Image: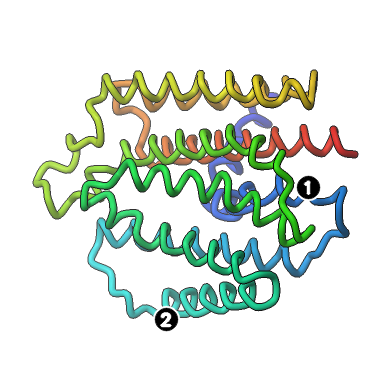
Amino acid sequence: MFQSIFKTINHYLYHPLFLVLTIPLSYLISGTLYAGQYAHFSFVHFFLLYSFTFINHLLGNFLFKKTKESISYFQLSFIAFEIINLLLIFYFSFRVHYLAGLLLLLYSLVIHLQFYLVKQGYAWLMLVFSSIFKGGILTYLSFYVQANFIPSTLFYWSIPLVLVVFLVEFGKLQLNYGSIHKDFSNDQTTLLFLKQELFNRIFLGLTVLIYLISFIIFIPTFNKLSFIILLTIPFALSIIQSILSTKKTVPTKLKQRMLYIYSISFFIAFSIILFVHIF
């Protein structure tokens, strides 16, 4: 019975539709919950910001697919999403704040240019930008669109979130580096961002650092609630076991989904800490 339940949960957790809907939501939930103690929840602003994040996630997936296949930009769905993307940026620029619109524009540029930056040798720069925007800027904006200000504590608390996104993006880059550089290498299967041994060390070090910094930052404010973060350790161990393994028994797509699930679990765990602490 328990095995059946576990398999069912895993089936839904790793389902592409679940991930594509939940990943953008995870970036916004912490800031939105924290804003609840300062302002009434604005569903319109939340939905529009989620729509923007969701659309950019889809655009990122499309652009990644284009690195592997010959796909035309002149597809109706791609053009429609780009138009909606621009309309949402204009909306936040004129109805919320021009800086909010500017940050969303920059975020969208990061999504659009991420693979170009990798191909041009700016992979580390891409990792930094992507992590700051997904883990930090979206958290701040999700708070701002609700409360019209950003508390300094949110900048401090978001550091572990930025590191988590960096870890996930770092893992994704290692897994997909050959596909991104297919035009420059005849052997895509062996082309890696970093040598596997060096990657393993950095990946493990980042994972440990995430929990150390989380406790250093969270415990002074949240006390025992900070230990909720430990609930994400099983997800961390699963990605360490699969990604750092030299065996090719786990498909790349599954490894990437495991990275996403870890990110989602961490953002949700932090959101639970905030929710219990506030309410």
Type of amino acid under label 2: Leu
Quadrant holding the C terminus:
top right
Residue at the image position 61 percent from the left and 43 percent from the top = 12
Kindly identify which residue carries mark 2: 76
Q: Nearer the viewer, residue 252 or 173?
A: 173
Q: Residues within 10 Å of mark 1 (few under 14, many from 20)?
A: many
Label 1 residue SS: helix
Q: Is residue 119 above or below residue 269?
A: below
Residue 131 location (% of width, % of height): 48, 44
State the mark number for residue 81. Answer: none
Q: Is residue 247 above or below residue 154?
A: above
Kindly identify which residue carries mark 1: 33
Q: CA distance from mark 1 to mark 2?
A: 36 Å
Q: Nearer the viewer, residue 101 or 8?
A: 101
Residue 7 location (% of width, % of height): 60, 32
The reply, left or right, for residue 93 in relation to residue 181 is: right
Residue at the image position 70 percent from the left and 33 percent from the top = 269
